[in-house]
Amino acid sequence: SSPHLQTYNERAQRHANKAARALLRVMEEKQSNLSVSVDVTKSKDFFDIIEAVGPHVCLIKTHIDILEDFDPTVIDRLRELSEKHKFLIFEDRKFADIVPWHCSIQKGSTRSQDWAHITNAHAVPGPSIITGLASVGIPKDRGLILLAEMSSKGALTTGSYTEDAVRMARARRDFVIGFIAQHRMEGIGASDTDNIAGEDFLVLAPGVGLDATGDAMGQQYRTPEQVVFESGCDVIIVGRGIYGKGENVDTREVLKQAQRYQAAGWEAYKKRVQR
Ligand code: 5FU
């Protein structure tokens, strides 16, 4: 049956990639398909949010370059919290360049391959982006997510672009574990000769909100029910729905919202695998 009708646990046992297996196991263990996107600029707010939501998430998504007071101790603390609360880390780096930058991710200031279990890339440069990132990520058991569909209004990630992104992923199923997308992607763009049996792409969906339908800058929100139950996505990515502006955060409110989204995401998943 299609992966979205199987339990996270069943999929964890079969997945070819170690980071994907770890994520699926954590989801089942913590009963959470919630990823919180911690898009704040001060490390105090960053850690206040992570401490509050840590027990309720499977994955913390970062844009590490937006921290105005970043220093290497941020990474040490983030890794400690990842072990303490058992969540994986996803650096939303959106690589989109030719291969030589992979030298820079090994040597630059943040070196996300050392601490992020998962990172992502645009498909626009073609298969070389996967080859390049795999050369750094595979030895460290990392997983890569490709952007197949974006949540913003007017996004160009549609039709044949999405299909080509899925074809690129299919060719590297050991490393590409899934997509940023709004729907399931197994079998998309496959020809009769492609072996798609056992294809299991994790679908991580941003643009999730319970109280808003969008923002003034083109973001579009769908509910956990729409994303997980109706469209079969696996992980809900929530930012402002949980921490609002993200300044001087009220950790009790953040905790309350995290629990609310965790419950909504899990309920939609239970409903999906039970049907
Ligand atoms: F690839 C994408 C996308 O298509 N839409 C997104 O919103 C990524 N995102 C990220 O998810 C975006 O960069 C934010 O980090 C996060 C959504 O945050 P929000 O506060 O829930 O809108």
Image: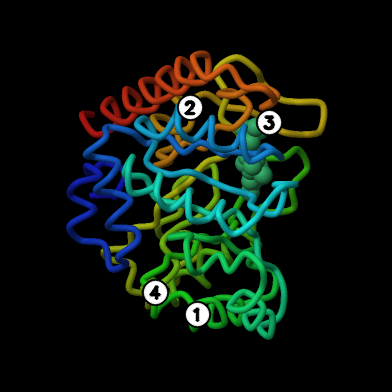
- Mark 4 Cα shell of 10 Å, populated few (<14), some (14-19), many (≥20): some
**Mark 1 falls on what kind of element?**
helix
Q: Residue at x 49, y 18 (%)?
A: 257
Quick check: marks 4 and 2 in contact, CB under 8 Å?
Answer: no
Residue 190 locus on image (x, y percent): 45, 68
Secondary structure type for disc 3 = loop
Quadrant in the rendering for residue 262:
top left
Amino acid type, label 2: Gln
Q: Which residue is mark 3?
A: 220
Q: Kindly identify which numbered label has been placed on residue 136.
A: 1
On-image quarter of the C terminus:
top left
Q: Which residue is mark 2?
A: 226
Seen at 55% across and 47% down, the residue is 181
- Discs 1/2, front: 1
Element at badge 2? helix
Give the distance between the C-alpha atoms of the residues marked 3 and 1, in whole angstroms.
Answer: 34 Å
**Tag of residue 240:** none
> Which comes sooner in the sequence, label 3 or label 4?
4
- Number of the label disc, if any, that sits on residue 140: 4
Q: Work out whether mark 1 precedes mark 2 in sequence or the reverse, and give the earlier one.
A: 1
Amino acid at circle 4? Lys
Q: Is residue 229 above or below residue 63?
A: above
Q: Nearer the viewer, residue 161 or 21?
A: 21
